[in-house]
Image (spheres, helix red, strand yellow):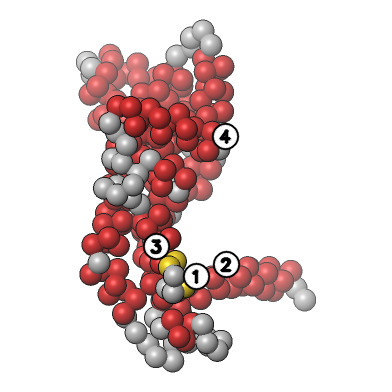
Amino acid sequence: MPMTKTKTLGITLYILFVLTPIYWLLNMSFKTNEEITGDLSFWPKEFTFDNYMVIFTDPSWYMGYFNSMTYVALNVVITLMVALPAAYAFSRYKFLGDKQMFFWLLTNRMAPPAVFLLPFFQLYSSVGLFDTHIAVALAHCLFNVPLAVWILEGFMSGVPKEIDETAYIDGYSFPRFFVRIFLPMIRSGIGVSAFFAFMFSWVELLLARTLTSVEAKPIAAIMTRTIGATGVDWGVLAAAGVLTILPGLLVIWFVRNHVAKGFALGRV
Protein backbone atom coordinates (compact mmCIF):
# COMPACT_ATOMS: atom_id res chain seq x y z
CA MET A 1 0.00 0.00 0.00
CA PRO A 2 1.44 3.43 -0.94
CA MET A 3 2.54 5.67 1.88
CA THR A 4 -0.11 8.32 1.03
CA LYS A 5 -2.94 5.79 1.31
CA THR A 6 -1.51 4.48 4.56
CA LYS A 7 -1.47 7.99 6.05
CA THR A 8 -5.00 8.65 4.82
CA LEU A 9 -6.24 5.40 6.35
CA GLY A 10 -4.47 6.12 9.63
CA ILE A 11 -5.90 9.64 9.87
CA THR A 12 -9.39 8.38 9.00
CA LEU A 13 -9.25 5.69 11.68
CA TYR A 14 -7.99 8.21 14.22
CA ILE A 15 -10.79 10.68 13.41
CA LEU A 16 -13.39 7.93 13.72
CA PHE A 17 -11.88 6.87 17.04
CA VAL A 18 -12.04 10.44 18.37
CA LEU A 19 -15.52 11.25 17.06
CA THR A 20 -17.20 7.99 18.13
CA PRO A 21 -17.73 9.02 21.80
CA ILE A 22 -19.06 12.42 20.69
CA TYR A 23 -21.48 10.80 18.25
CA TRP A 24 -22.60 8.34 20.90
CA LEU A 25 -23.21 11.21 23.35
CA LEU A 26 -25.27 13.05 20.73
CA ASN A 27 -27.13 9.84 19.92
CA MET A 28 -28.02 9.25 23.59
CA SER A 29 -29.25 12.83 24.03
CA PHE A 30 -32.16 12.15 21.64
CA LYS A 31 -33.18 8.87 23.27
CA THR A 32 -35.38 7.97 26.20
CA ASN A 33 -33.84 6.34 29.25
CA GLU A 34 -35.66 3.11 28.44
CA GLU A 35 -34.08 2.96 25.00
CA ILE A 36 -30.63 3.90 26.32
CA THR A 37 -30.67 1.12 28.91
CA GLY A 38 -32.27 -1.32 26.48
CA ASP A 39 -30.89 -2.85 23.32
CA LEU A 40 -27.91 -1.41 21.47
CA SER A 41 -28.96 1.00 18.71
CA PHE A 42 -26.91 3.32 16.53
CA TRP A 43 -29.81 5.73 15.94
CA PRO A 44 -32.74 6.78 18.17
CA LYS A 45 -35.81 4.65 17.56
CA GLU A 46 -38.00 7.19 19.35
CA PHE A 47 -36.47 10.57 18.53
CA THR A 48 -37.16 13.04 21.36
CA PHE A 49 -36.16 16.56 22.43
CA ASP A 50 -37.44 16.07 25.97
CA ASN A 51 -33.94 15.83 27.41
CA TYR A 52 -33.02 19.25 26.02
CA MET A 53 -36.33 20.74 27.13
CA VAL A 54 -35.56 19.73 30.71
CA ILE A 55 -32.34 21.77 30.56
CA PHE A 56 -33.85 24.81 28.82
CA THR A 57 -36.90 25.00 31.13
CA ASP A 58 -35.32 24.15 34.49
CA PRO A 59 -33.56 27.19 36.08
CA SER A 60 -31.24 24.97 38.08
CA TRP A 61 -29.92 23.60 34.79
CA TYR A 62 -29.58 26.65 32.55
CA MET A 63 -28.28 28.78 35.41
CA GLY A 64 -25.41 26.32 35.66
CA TYR A 65 -24.35 27.27 32.14
CA PHE A 66 -24.77 30.96 33.00
CA ASN A 67 -22.61 30.58 36.11
CA SER A 68 -19.90 28.72 34.21
CA MET A 69 -19.79 31.26 31.38
CA THR A 70 -19.72 34.14 33.89
CA TYR A 71 -16.69 33.04 35.85
CA VAL A 72 -14.92 31.79 32.71
CA ALA A 73 -15.36 35.19 31.03
CA LEU A 74 -14.15 36.97 34.19
CA ASN A 75 -11.14 34.70 34.34
CA VAL A 76 -10.18 35.33 30.71
CA VAL A 77 -10.42 39.11 31.15
CA ILE A 78 -8.44 39.15 34.41
CA THR A 79 -5.84 36.76 33.02
CA LEU A 80 -5.16 38.95 29.99
CA MET A 81 -5.13 42.17 32.01
CA VAL A 82 -2.47 40.73 34.33
CA ALA A 83 -0.49 38.69 31.80
CA LEU A 84 -0.05 41.38 29.13
CA PRO A 85 1.99 43.87 31.22
CA ALA A 86 3.83 41.03 32.97
CA ALA A 87 4.82 39.42 29.67
CA TYR A 88 5.92 42.81 28.31
CA ALA A 89 8.19 43.30 31.32
CA PHE A 90 9.76 39.84 30.89
CA SER A 91 10.29 40.36 27.16
CA ARG A 92 11.66 43.92 27.24
CA TYR A 93 13.53 44.32 30.52
CA LYS A 94 16.26 42.48 32.41
CA PHE A 95 16.05 42.62 36.19
CA LEU A 96 17.39 40.71 39.18
CA GLY A 97 15.76 37.30 39.43
CA ASP A 98 13.77 37.59 36.21
CA LYS A 99 14.52 34.04 35.06
CA GLN A 100 13.85 32.61 38.52
CA MET A 101 10.55 34.47 38.73
CA PHE A 102 9.56 33.30 35.25
CA PHE A 103 10.25 29.70 36.26
CA TRP A 104 8.36 30.16 39.52
CA LEU A 105 5.30 31.29 37.57
CA LEU A 106 5.40 28.10 35.54
CA THR A 107 5.67 25.93 38.67
CA ASN A 108 2.24 27.23 39.72
CA ARG A 109 0.86 25.93 36.43
CA MET A 110 2.48 22.55 37.02
CA ALA A 111 0.86 22.06 40.45
CA PRO A 112 -2.47 20.19 40.63
CA PRO A 113 -5.51 22.26 41.69
CA ALA A 114 -6.02 20.03 44.75
CA VAL A 115 -2.86 21.53 46.31
CA PHE A 116 -4.52 24.98 46.54
CA LEU A 117 -8.01 23.76 47.38
CA LEU A 118 -7.88 24.11 51.17
CA PRO A 119 -6.14 27.54 51.23
CA PHE A 120 -8.61 28.98 48.73
CA PHE A 121 -11.60 27.52 50.57
CA GLN A 122 -10.54 28.91 53.95
CA LEU A 123 -9.51 32.29 52.54
CA TYR A 124 -12.69 32.86 50.55
CA SER A 125 -14.88 31.71 53.45
CA SER A 126 -13.13 34.25 55.69
CA VAL A 127 -13.48 37.24 53.37
CA GLY A 128 -17.00 36.47 52.13
CA LEU A 129 -16.11 35.44 48.57
CA PHE A 130 -17.32 31.85 48.89
CA ASP A 131 -19.99 30.88 46.34
CA THR A 132 -19.28 33.83 44.04
CA HIS A 133 -18.22 33.96 40.40
CA ILE A 134 -15.21 36.14 41.12
CA ALA A 135 -13.91 33.56 43.63
CA VAL A 136 -13.65 30.84 40.97
CA ALA A 137 -12.28 33.30 38.40
CA LEU A 138 -9.49 34.44 40.74
CA ALA A 139 -8.65 30.86 41.74
CA HIS A 140 -8.26 29.85 38.10
CA CYS A 141 -5.97 32.84 37.49
CA LEU A 142 -3.32 31.05 39.56
CA PHE A 143 -3.03 28.53 36.73
CA ASN A 144 -3.96 30.60 33.68
CA VAL A 145 -1.81 33.69 34.28
CA PRO A 146 1.53 31.79 34.18
CA LEU A 147 0.57 30.04 30.96
CA ALA A 148 -0.61 33.30 29.38
CA VAL A 149 2.61 35.08 30.41
CA TRP A 150 4.66 32.26 28.93
CA ILE A 151 2.81 32.37 25.60
CA LEU A 152 2.65 36.16 25.34
CA GLU A 153 6.33 36.58 26.23
CA GLY A 154 7.22 34.48 23.20
CA PHE A 155 5.08 36.61 20.90
CA MET A 156 6.39 39.87 22.35
CA SER A 157 10.01 38.78 22.10
CA GLY A 158 9.40 38.23 18.39
CA VAL A 159 8.56 41.93 17.97
CA PRO A 160 11.72 44.03 17.43
CA LYS A 161 12.50 46.52 20.20
CA GLU A 162 13.14 49.14 17.53
CA ILE A 163 9.37 49.47 17.10
CA ASP A 164 9.06 50.61 20.72
CA GLU A 165 11.84 53.16 20.27
CA THR A 166 10.42 54.47 17.01
CA ALA A 167 7.00 54.98 18.63
CA TYR A 168 8.56 56.95 21.49
CA ILE A 169 10.45 59.14 19.02
CA ASP A 170 7.19 59.81 17.18
CA GLY A 171 5.65 61.10 20.40
CA TYR A 172 3.56 58.11 21.42
CA SER A 173 2.93 57.72 25.14
CA PHE A 174 3.39 54.19 26.46
CA PRO A 175 -0.35 53.44 26.94
CA ARG A 176 -1.13 54.74 23.45
CA PHE A 177 1.75 52.79 21.90
CA PHE A 178 0.82 49.63 23.78
CA VAL A 179 -2.85 49.71 22.76
CA ARG A 180 -2.66 51.20 19.26
CA ILE A 181 0.55 49.60 17.92
CA PHE A 182 1.88 46.79 20.08
CA LEU A 183 -1.28 44.82 20.90
CA PRO A 184 -2.41 44.52 17.24
CA MET A 185 1.00 43.05 16.41
CA ILE A 186 0.54 40.22 18.93
CA ARG A 187 -3.19 39.66 18.44
CA SER A 188 -2.55 36.01 17.61
CA GLY A 189 -0.84 35.54 20.96
CA ILE A 190 -3.72 37.25 22.75
CA GLY A 191 -6.20 34.98 20.99
CA VAL A 192 -4.26 31.82 21.85
CA SER A 193 -3.80 32.90 25.48
CA ALA A 194 -7.52 33.60 25.78
CA PHE A 195 -8.23 30.20 24.24
CA PHE A 196 -6.10 28.27 26.73
CA ALA A 197 -7.46 30.32 29.65
CA PHE A 198 -11.01 29.61 28.52
CA MET A 199 -10.44 25.89 28.06
CA PHE A 200 -8.83 25.38 31.49
CA SER A 201 -11.45 27.42 33.32
CA TRP A 202 -14.31 25.76 31.43
CA VAL A 203 -13.28 22.15 32.14
CA GLU A 204 -11.82 22.59 35.64
CA LEU A 205 -14.19 21.06 38.19
CA LEU A 206 -12.43 20.57 41.54
CA LEU A 207 -11.99 24.24 42.47
CA ALA A 208 -15.21 25.35 40.80
CA ARG A 209 -17.27 22.77 42.68
CA THR A 210 -15.61 23.26 46.07
CA LEU A 211 -15.66 27.07 46.05
CA THR A 212 -19.37 27.25 45.13
CA SER A 213 -22.56 25.85 46.58
CA VAL A 214 -25.73 27.42 45.13
CA GLU A 215 -25.42 30.90 43.60
CA ALA A 216 -22.38 30.21 41.38
CA LYS A 217 -22.58 26.44 40.97
CA PRO A 218 -21.13 25.42 37.55
CA ILE A 219 -22.82 23.12 35.07
CA ALA A 220 -20.26 20.37 35.58
CA ALA A 221 -21.29 20.13 39.24
CA ILE A 222 -24.99 20.29 38.41
CA MET A 223 -24.62 17.34 36.04
CA THR A 224 -24.02 15.07 39.05
CA ARG A 225 -27.60 15.72 40.24
CA THR A 226 -28.91 13.34 37.57
CA ILE A 227 -27.83 10.49 39.87
CA GLY A 228 -30.67 9.74 42.25
CA ALA A 229 -32.48 6.95 44.05
CA THR A 230 -34.16 5.87 40.82
CA GLY A 231 -30.85 5.64 38.97
CA VAL A 232 -29.14 7.87 36.43
CA ASP A 233 -31.10 10.08 34.05
CA TRP A 234 -28.90 9.18 31.10
CA GLY A 235 -30.78 11.20 28.49
CA VAL A 236 -30.63 14.51 30.36
CA LEU A 237 -27.00 13.86 31.30
CA ALA A 238 -26.13 13.25 27.62
CA ALA A 239 -27.97 16.41 26.52
CA ALA A 240 -26.12 18.44 29.15
CA GLY A 241 -22.84 16.97 27.91
CA VAL A 242 -23.59 17.98 24.32
CA LEU A 243 -24.41 21.54 25.36
CA THR A 244 -21.23 21.66 27.44
CA ILE A 245 -19.11 20.82 24.39
CA LEU A 246 -20.58 23.60 22.22
CA PRO A 247 -18.83 26.63 23.84
CA GLY A 248 -15.45 24.95 23.43
CA LEU A 249 -16.18 24.22 19.77
CA LEU A 250 -17.10 27.88 19.18
CA VAL A 251 -13.89 29.12 20.81
CA ILE A 252 -11.80 26.67 18.78
CA TRP A 253 -13.52 27.86 15.59
CA PHE A 254 -12.64 31.50 16.27
CA VAL A 255 -8.97 30.86 17.13
CA ARG A 256 -8.35 27.96 14.74
CA ASN A 257 -5.91 30.02 12.65
CA HIS A 258 -3.82 30.98 15.69
CA VAL A 259 -3.52 27.74 17.66
CA ALA A 260 -0.55 26.33 15.72
CA LYS A 261 1.28 29.63 16.03
CA GLY A 262 0.56 29.63 19.74
CA PHE A 263 2.26 26.29 20.23
CA ALA A 264 5.34 27.80 18.55
CA LEU A 265 5.13 30.84 20.87
CA GLY A 266 4.88 33.15 17.87
CA ARG A 267 8.25 32.21 16.43
CA VAL A 268 7.01 30.86 13.11
Cβ atoms under marks 4 and 2 closer than 8 Å: no
Amino acid of disc 3:
Arg
In the rendered image, residue 257, in percent from the top left (x then y), is placed at: 43, 52
Give the structural element (helix, strand or loop) at label 4. Answer: helix
Q: CA distance from mark 2 to mark 1?
A: 8 Å
Viewer-nearest of discs 3 and 4? 3
Label 4 sits on residue: 110
Looking at the image, can residue 80 be seen? Answer: no
Residue 85 visible? The answer is: yes
Q: Secondary structure at mark 3?
A: helix
Residue 18: numbered disc: 2
Looking at the image, which residue sits at the far bottom? 45
Mark 2, mark 1: which one is toward the viewer?
A: 1
Q: Residues within 10 Å of mark 1 (few under 14, many from 20)?
A: some
Mark 3 sits on what residue?
225
Residue sitting at x 37%, y 87%: 47
Q: Amino acid at mark 1?
A: Ile
Q: Amino acid at mark 4?
A: Met
CB within 8 Å, label 3 to label 1? no
Spatial separation of the CA atoms under disc 2 and disc 3: 27 Å
Question: How far separated are the C-alphas under marks 4 and 2?
Answer: 27 Å
User: Residue at label 1?
Assistant: 22
